Image (spheres, rainbow, N blue to C red):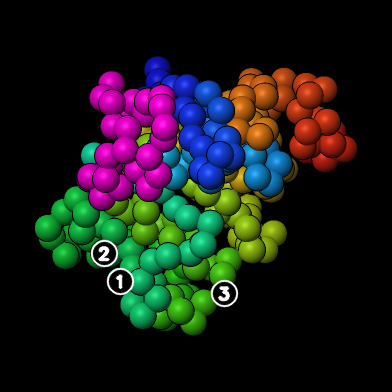
Amino acid sequence: MSILSVQNINLARGGLKILDNLSLEAQAGHVTSVIGPNGAGKTTIFNVISGFMRPDSGAVVYDGRNVTSMLPEKLCNMGLARTFQRVRGLPSLSVRDNIVVGALNRTSSVRQAKKEADALIEELDLGEYRDQSATSLSIGTRKIVEVARVLSTGPNVVLLDEVMGGLGPSEVNIMVEFIRKLPERGIAVLLVEHHMEAVMSVSDHIVVINRGRNLAEGTPTEVAQDPGVIEAYLGSEASNA
């Protein structure tokens, strides 16, 4: 069942076509990955879905409702949340407080927010950083904190934008296992990621885009064997994955 449907999105800036009739879906209970070469339009389509950019045409339908160009904070309150390639968050606050702020999006109880934050800290192996300010952490660890903060808002759909960039091998393994478990919580995942081994491991479905257009889609095996995908992006890494 599709909980998020992106339908025929077009977007141009300065006469340059950035997204060209692009469509994709996120299914409830699934991890859907969006891959493609640099400049393919992956982050741009995330910006459109999450309300940070207005498309020239097309529609974003979430949970049966047209939410095209709706404000990001309203979408978050409705259960559609995202991370960013460039880490945001609240750098002056501790790791725990960053996550607590996210949890307060859906509960007025600070006690409950702290309880949920502590559970996420344990799941993502952030215990040693609990009381450190976010600004003191490495980029990789700050990305993990951002994932926890976004998840604490209680989304039904989460858009994860290159959350494994800057992570070490052990951190990637923790993140992969965490993402795999999100559908069990009723959270549909839309993932943009360049770490191809992780993508192939965690995805139920993959959408490949190139130059703002749909190129191919299917299971990880189907996508890895698609000649057009191999030529455009995967290359020899597909067979290794």
Q: x%, y% of residue 231?
A: 83, 31
Magenta region includes residue 42: no
Pick whichever of labels 3 and 2 is earlier in the sequence: 2
Instruction: Report if residue 123 is visible in the image.
Output: no
Q: x%, y% of residue 196?
A: 71, 42
Instruction: Report if residue 134 is visible in the image.
Output: yes
Element assignment for label 2: helix
Q: What residue is drawn where x is 29% and y is 32%?
A: 67
- In the image, residue 162 sits, relative to residue 228, either above or below, namely below
Instruction: Give the side of residue 154 with respect to residue 86, left or right.
Output: left
Element assignment for label 3: loop
Instruction: Give the side of residue 37 with respect to residue 89, left or right.
Output: right
Question: Residue 172 sits in which quadrant?
Answer: bottom right
Which residue lies most toward the left here? 108
Please name the residue that numbered disc 3 is placed on: 138
Please name the residue that numbered disc 2 is placed on: 101
Element assignment for label 1: helix
Separation of marks 3 and 2 at Cα, in angstroms: 21 Å
Q: Nearer the viewer, residue 105 or 50?
A: 50
Q: Nearer the viewer, residue 14 or 193?
A: 14
Q: x%, y% of residue 32?
A: 53, 31
Please name the residue that numbered disc 1 is placed on: 97
Q: What residue is drawn where x is 27% and y is 64%?
A: 100
Question: Three-letter amino acid code at disc 2?
Answer: Val
Separation of marks 1 and 3 at Cα, in angstroms: 17 Å
Which residue lies most toward the right here? 236
Highlighted magenta segment, given as a residue range? 51-77
Question: Three-letter amino acid code at disc 1?
Answer: Asp
Q: What residue is drawn where x is 50% and y is 68%?
A: 142
Q: Nearer the viewer, residue 75 or 225?
A: 75
Q: What residue is drawn where x is 46% and y is 79%?
A: 135
